Each structure stands twice: as structure tokens, then as C-alpha cells.
Image (cartoon, rainbow, N blue to C red):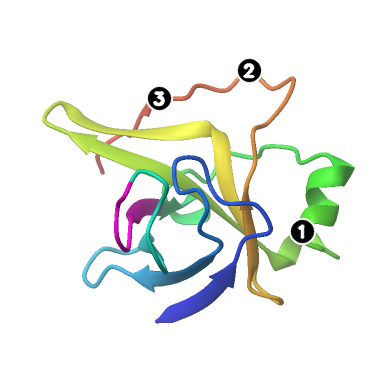
């Protein structure tokens, strides 16, 4: 599966890109690659972020979006939202950014990376191995 996505504001570190493809990573349930269409300000061509589906890997994770954030991606209901977190693998394991999730409106294909305000969530939470 791959889904074309548009971001009203470029995700952090991927400026100025706003067009992406969200691709399932074969053989890894709930793991996606977000691939940019173009070159970032830092000169990276077709940049790639790895994202985990929070519903699959972090079922207790339930951040609250502000009304303004909901409006940015035109969510009508919570069921339309696909909640993804940036995964950062390294030798010691994998961490996920719970403070700045990527939220996709599954109905429209519009996504955004939001910084969650007034929520005590880590930038680098250890991902438990299953």
C-alpha cells in the first residue's frame, strides 16, 4: 500500500517539501516510510522518515490535538485520524518521538507533524520489543 500525502507545512527537517508518499514497509506490520518528493533545504533528495502506526505499536498512546491542529488537517472525526510516530533506530534499540506525532487525515490525504503543547510526552521514548 502507498498513499499520496500533502502537508500544509513541511515536517521538521524536511523543509520545504510538502508532497510525500506513505509506503508500507513489507514484512513489518505497522511500519511505514514517509518519502518526500524533491530535495530538502539541507540537500537531501527524496528524504525518508520511518513512522510507526501508534494504533499497532503504542495502543495506550492517546495525545490530544488542539482545535487549531484538527483544523489544519480538516479532521471531522477521530476515526479519520491515522496517528503515526517517528521511529529512530540505533544500536541500542529504537526510540519514538511521542511529542511530535504525524497525524494523517485518512479521508483527505492531508497530514501534519504537530508539536503537542502542555502534554508531558518524551521526544525519545524507548520502544519495547515484542
* Other residues around mark 1 within 10 Å, as few (<14) / some (14–19) / many (≥20): few
Q: Is residue 39 magenta?
A: no
What label sits on residue 124 in the rendered view?
3
Residue 41 horizontal/vertical position (percent): 42, 47
Of 75 and 128, the residue lying toward us:
75
Residue 6 horizontal/vertical position (percent): 60, 68
Of 55 and 7, the residue lying toward us:
7
Instruction: Left or right? Give the position of 83 relative to 81.
Output: left
Highlighted magenta segment, given as a residue range: 43-51
Please tell me whether mark 1 or mark 3 is closer to you in this view: 3
Whether tag 1 and tag 2 are in contact, CB under 8 A, the answer is: no
Of 28 and 13, the residue lying toward us:
13
Judging by the rendered image, the residue that carries numbered circle 1 is 78
What label sits on residue 6 in the rendered view?
none
Picture quarter with the C terminus:
top left
Residue 47 occupies which quadrant of the picture? bottom left
Residue visible at 37% across and 72% down in the picture? 23
Q: CA distance from mark 1 to mark 3?
A: 25 Å
Of 34 and 8, the residue lying toward us:
8
What label sits on residue 120 in the rendered view?
2
**Label 1 vs 3, first from the N-terminus:** 1
Q: CA distance from mark 2 to mark 3?
A: 12 Å
Numbered disc 2: secondary structure: loop
Picture quarter with the N terminus:
bottom left
Whether tag 1 and tag 3 are in contact, CB under 8 A, the answer is: no
Numbered disc 3: secondary structure: loop
Up-down: is 127 above or below 27?
above
Amino acid at each position: 500500500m502507498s498513499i499520496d500525502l500533502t502537508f500544509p507545512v513541511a515536517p521538521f527537517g524536511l523543509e520545504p517539501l510538502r508532497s510525500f508518499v506513505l509506503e508500507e514497509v513489507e514484512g513489518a506490520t505497522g511500519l511505514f516510510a514517509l518519502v518526500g518528493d524533491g530535495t530538502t533545504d539541507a540537500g537531501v533528495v527524496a528524504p525518508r522518515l520511518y513512522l510507526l502506526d501508534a494504533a499497532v505499536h503504542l495502543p495506550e498512546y492517546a495525545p490530544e490535538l488542539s482545535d487549531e491542529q484538527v483544523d489544519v488537517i480538516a479532521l471531522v472525526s477521530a476515526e479519520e485520524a491515522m496517528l503515526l510516530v517517528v521511529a529512530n533506530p540505533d544500536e541500542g534499540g529504537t526510540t519514538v518521538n511521542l511529542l511530535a506525532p504525524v497525524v494523517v487525515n485518512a479521508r483527505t490525504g492531508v497530514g501534519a507533524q504537530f508539536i503537542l503543547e502542555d502534554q508531558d510526552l518524551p521526544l525519545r521514548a524507548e520502544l519495547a520489543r515484542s
